[in-house]
Amino acid sequence: MAKWEEIMGDDDDFGEIGAELDLVAGMGTSEIIGEDDEIGDEDLLHALSIGAARRGHHRKANALKKAASKLTEYRKIDPGAVAIRQRDLTKRRRFPLGFQPTTVLAGSTSNIPAAPQDMFRPERLVIPSDIAFDFGVQDVKVGNTSQLVSGGEVPAALFTEVSIDTHVHFKTAEIGNQMSVSVRNKTGASIEFSAGVVGTVVQA
């Protein structure tokens, strides 16, 4: 039984209720078993089912057994089919996100992007006060959606680090969405624009 004990792992290997699994076409089995080619996906799922049953997690054990049976059937059609785990997003943290520092020419407008790597809800845009009075904010977008109520320009000074009551709930940026701010340089000289946004990140 040493082999089974080695691969069964903790109770959390497939989540609390066990094996919220999808079966997908793929190239090999590294998604589940890494580099060990001696053990198939079906064997691993059966082993995890045995481990869950021994620990009294019968619902989890049944889910794993069903996943193993499904995978066996899928493998008859697609030998490269693999099982993957679906994990809920449960960790909530506040993080900053920076915009790319960009030199904006005198009197011109520039669209400046930021790309969050996790699901992110922006809640406070911060533009440094030493440049804020030189810029107007023409738009703030999450993906392709404007976050301003109307098309009018907003003074960048509204969003300085010393501004009061400027917390907002912008649209949540999904993974792959960009956030962008469109600014106008109101002066007669080129100025480097920089900004950041503080918000809530949700992770698995």
Image (cartoon, grey):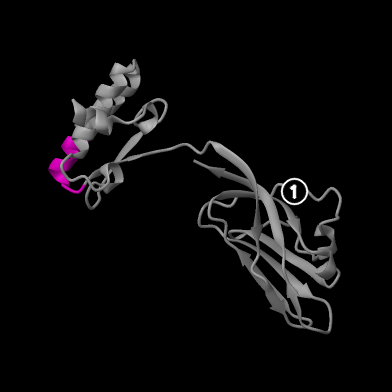
The residue lying toward the viewer, choosing from 106 and 31, is 31
Residue at image position (85%, 63%) is: 157
Q: Quadrant of residue 137?
A: bottom right
Is 178 one of the magenta-colored residues? no
Residue 24: horizontal and vertical position, in percent? 28, 45
Residue 171: horizontal and vertical position, in percent? 64, 50
Q: Which residues are magenta?
A: 71-80
Residue 189: horizontal and vertical position, in percent? 81, 84
Q: Is residue 66 in sight in this rendering?
A: no
Amino acid residing under circle 1:
Val
Residue at image position (19%, 40%) is: 74
Question: Which residue does the numbered mark 1 point to in the structure image?
Answer: 168
Give the crowd class for mark 1: few <14, some 14-19, many >=20 residues within 10 Å: few
The residue lying toward the viewer, choosing from 54 and 191, is 54
Q: Residue furthest top?
A: 56
Query: Above or below — where is 58 with respect to 192?
Result: above
Predominant SS along the magenta part: helix
Q: How many marks?
A: 1
In this rendering, position of residue 98 left or right of residue 59: right
Residue at image position (54%, 57%) is: 177
In this rendering, position of residue 83 left or right of residue 200: left
Is 77 one of the magenta-colored residues? yes
In this rendering, position of residue 100 left or right of residue 129: left
Query: Above or below — where is 135 with respect to 70?
Result: below
Query: Above or below — where is 119 with respect to 191?
Result: above
Residue at image position (81%, 71%) is: 135
Q: Quadrant of residue 18?
A: top left
Q: Is residue 72 in sight in this rendering?
A: yes
